[in-house]
Image: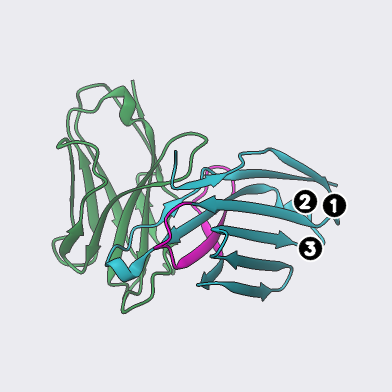
Chain colours: A green, B cyan
Amino acid sequence: GAGVSQSPRYKVAKRGQDVALRCDPISGHVSLFWYQQALGQGPEFLTYFQNEAQLDKSGLPSDRFFAERPEGSVSTLKIQRTQQEDSAVYLCASSFGQGQNIQYFGAGTRLSVL
Amino acid sequence: QKEVEQDPGPLSVPEGAIVSLNCTYSNSAFQYFMWYRQYSRKGPELLMYTYSSGNKEDGRFTAQVDKSSKYISLFIRDSQPSDSATYLCAMSAMDTGRRALTFGSGTRLQVQP
């Protein structure tokens, strides 16, 4: 497809379960970003990859959050031992890189932790 | 205090009105300014992208950046019901090597037919 693709669109987890969220960026985009959006708020930065290298993970809220992009394309955000406060929409964005920072977003994964 | 402040609204206007949306920010390192539109249960969609101060126009949309006042605006002319959405401002300071976008909390706009 032409845009950023995220799956699943919705995920319900019981507290304590591990979840994995997938992002497929726009083909050829070097940079990939994960953001967390709470209800009624703007997205907040979690982490950033350039190709397979994770260059910034300053926004990850705890060591329960882990992201990877092993081949420089698809990325997975993993949350271990989910808590109720992890309930949010997780957005993935990609950009061409190479000096410009125009980020294109996917539709997001809505995570509900019960 | 947040780095980027944005009035959450809701802002309700009649169809055809001129809409003004604004953000203020505190970080003088911000150089890249964006406006995104987000419909309910969708991802943010890029509307405007500007670098440093000045104006940029694209169809019914005009973005203004005043770095001296740390204030950015988005104007929508001839507003339509289809413009009803949440508008997010976003900024980044790439010169520091940091590529993360910092967003405002969003302004919800309702255009009444």
B44 to the left or right of A61 = right
Tell me, for residue B77, which label it has, or none.
Answer: 3
Q: Using a 10 Å C-alpha cutoff, classify the residue at mark 1 as few (fewer than 14 neighbours), some (14 to 19) or many (20 or more).
A: some
Q: Position of residue A21 (x, y in %)?
A: 28, 45
Which quarter shows the N terminus of chain B?
top left
Q: Nearer the viewer, mark 2 or mark 3?
A: 3
Q: Are marks 2 and 3 in contact (CB under 8 Å)?
A: no
Is B41 inside the magenta-drawn segment?
A: yes
Tell me, for residue B73, which label it has, or none.
Answer: none
Above-or-below relation of B6 to A18: below
- Chain part drawn in magenta: B26-47
Which residue is the site of mark 1? B15
For this rendering, which residue is in front, A20 or B33? B33
- The tag earlier along the polypeptide, 3 or 1, is 1
For this rendering, which residue is in front, B58 or B90? B90
**Labels 3 and 1 positioned on one and the same chain:** yes
Label 2 lies in what chain?
B
For this rendering, which residue is in front, B32 or B70? B70
Label 3 lies in what chain?
B
Gap in angstroms between the C-alphas marked 2 and 3: 12 Å
Gap in angstroms between the C-alphas marked 3 and 1: 10 Å
Which residue is the site of mark 2? B81
Q: Position of residue A86 (x, y in %)?
A: 31, 31
Q: Amino acid at mark 2?
A: Pro
**Labels 1 and 2 positioned on one and the same chain:** yes
Name the residue at 51% across, 54% down.
B44
Q: Amino acid at mark 3?
A: Arg
Name the residue at 64% across, 67% down.
B63
Q: Amino acid at mark 1?
A: Glu
Above-or-below relation of B50 to A106: below
Q: Are marks 1 and 2 in contact (CB under 8 Å)?
A: yes
